[in-house]
Image (cartoon, rainbow, N blue to C red):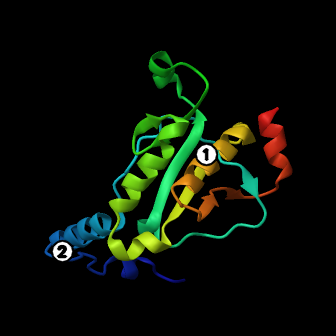
Amino acid sequence: MIKFNSFRSVNRNLPAISTASLPDIVFILLFFFMTVTTIKEQNLMVENTLPKATETEKLDKRDRIIEIFVGNSTNTHQSMMGSGTRIQMNNRFVAIEEVGDYALQALYQMPEHLRKVATVSIKADVAVKMGIIEDLKKELRLVNLLKINYTTFEGNVFDNQMRVD
């Protein structure tokens, strides 16, 4: 017969856990989150459910992108601006005739070496009519901003029709 008591009699007092490295770990985590976290640049004032597309390509360099959001105003802004499709640039609603001016302002805020490679990114809600997008493109064409990108999610295109209905 085996005696198990002999195993229990072994002194199992563990040494206390050293907390000397705990401040180092906390600072490493703090620096990690400080370097990885980005500050939200724009508050979205329009509904923005992006459509899906099969052929997508990611824009890597965000410093050369001028963003234009198109969609119905959110519930919080409908009391001020009413319902209907709105265009948002730099945390403000913009009329279609003002898009060119605001796009040029955004362009001239970029460093000079990035102005030639700037891209206008249209982030239109899936329910936005194409006529508004065409008018937007005309305004951008007038100020010679011809490099336009449509921001989408990757997915089945036929899901867009189901969301509009």
Residue at left offset 32%, top offset 70%: 111
Find out whether the residues at labels 2 and 1 contact each other: C-beta distance under 8 Å.
Answer: no
**CA–CA distance between discs 2 and 1?**
52 Å
Residue 105 appears at what percent x and percent y?
37, 53
Q: Is residue 89 left or right of residue 29?
A: right
- The residue labelled by disc 1 is 136
Residue at left offset 48%, top offset 21%: 81
> What is the residue that sits farthest to the left in this orientation?
20
Residue 36 vs 98, above or below: the answer is below
Residue 120 vs 73, above or below: the answer is below
Residue 89 appears at what percent x and percent y?
45, 44
Q: Visible in this render: residue 16?
A: no
Q: Which of marks 2 and 1 is nearer the N terminus?
A: 2
**Quadrant of the image containing the C terminus:** top right
**Closest to the observer: 84 or 105?**
105
Q: Visible in this render: residue 101?
A: yes
* Amino acid type assigned to the residue bearing label 1 in the image: Leu
Q: In this view, does 36 lie to the left or right of 31?
A: right
Residue 116 appears at what percent x and percent y?
46, 73
Q: What element carries label 2?
A: helix
* Amino acid type assigned to the residue bearing label 2 in the image: Asp
Residue 26 vs 4, above or below: the answer is above
Residue 102 appears at what percent x and percent y?
42, 47
> What is the residue that sits farthest to the front in this orientation?
142
- The residue labelled by disc 2 is 24
